[in-house]
Image (spheres, rainbow, N blue to C red):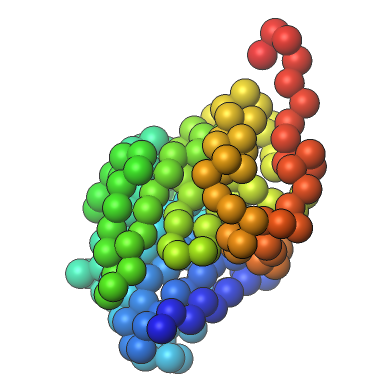
Amino acid sequence: MLTVNQIIEEKYKANSYVVADGKECIVIDINPNTIEFIQQNELTPYFLFLTHEHFDHIKGTSSLKKMFPNMQIIASPKASELMATSQGNLSFFINGTGFDEIHADIQAEDKSEFFFKDKCIKIYHTPGHTTGGIVISIDNMLFTGDTILDIKTPTTLPNSSKKQLKESINFIDEMFDNNTIFYQGHGKPFLKSKWDKTISLPSIKKNI
């Protein structure tokens, strides 16, 4: 049986999720508190899925990989490209130096499938907040990163697109039923039936 643990990073309130079955787990996004949780609970991570390349969702990746070299880091091809540089992952703009040299072991194409125990994990590309965004589906759970939030999704950062975000949001709305639990990149999980899609949808000018 899967248990979902939400790990919150203090400064930017970014969520990481540790999805465990016994002493094995997968990790969805990461922050330094994730590593502490894994160590305290003596877990072994099998996969680390990164929903997108922004620093607040990938910080700690290199450290966890050193601890568990057999763990596979999975991201979209575009996120893998961008998170390898401090400007691409936006960490440069925080302190002028940032961090880089993070690479995915597996660049997941749209509709890729992975397996953890008896569970099928499906990956869908959802660009908009970033070009490298993905969502991750496991049973009735959807880990949305920053594609869907309970506030308006930012589209003013580099590599954002309002047009792509609208397409991604409409895809998610059509693909997943109201019993789906959205595990968002910031904030508490919520049922799709409680989702106000009008908040998520960006206003798009005709010239975009």
Q: Point out residue 130 in the picture as x, y percentages from the top left corner.
A: 54, 36
Instruction: Judge whether 129 appears above or below 98 on screen.
Output: above
Q: Residue at 27%, 75% (x, y): give it.
A: 117
Q: Is residue 38 left or right of residue 163?
A: left
Q: Is residue 124 left or right of residue 150?
A: left
Instruction: Judge whether 171 appears above or below 70 on screen.
Output: above
Q: Point out residue 197 in the picture as x, y percentages from the top left corner.
A: 74, 43
Quadrant location, the C terminus? top right
Q: Residue at 62%, 71% (x, y): give it.
A: 8
Residue situated in front as seen by the camera: 179 or 154? 179
Q: Is residue 23 left or right of residue 94?
A: left
Q: Residue at 52%, 44% (x, y): give it.
A: 175
Quadrant location, the N terminus? bottom left
Residue situated in front as seen by the camera: 66 or 6? 6
Instruction: Judge whether 34 appears above or below 11 on screen.
Output: below
Question: For residue 22, which quarter of the picture?
Answer: bottom left
Q: Point out residue 23 in the picture as x, y percentages from the top left corner.
A: 34, 88
Q: Residue at 48%, 61% (x, y): give it.
A: 29
Res 107 seen here: yes
Q: Residue furthest left?
A: 70
Q: Point out residue 95 in the picture as x, y percentages from the top left corner.
A: 60, 50
Residue situated in front as seen by the camera: 168 or 69? 168
Question: For residue 78, which quarter of the picture?
Answer: top left
Q: Tally the numbered discs.
A: 0
Q: Residue furthest top?
A: 207
Res 85 seen here: no
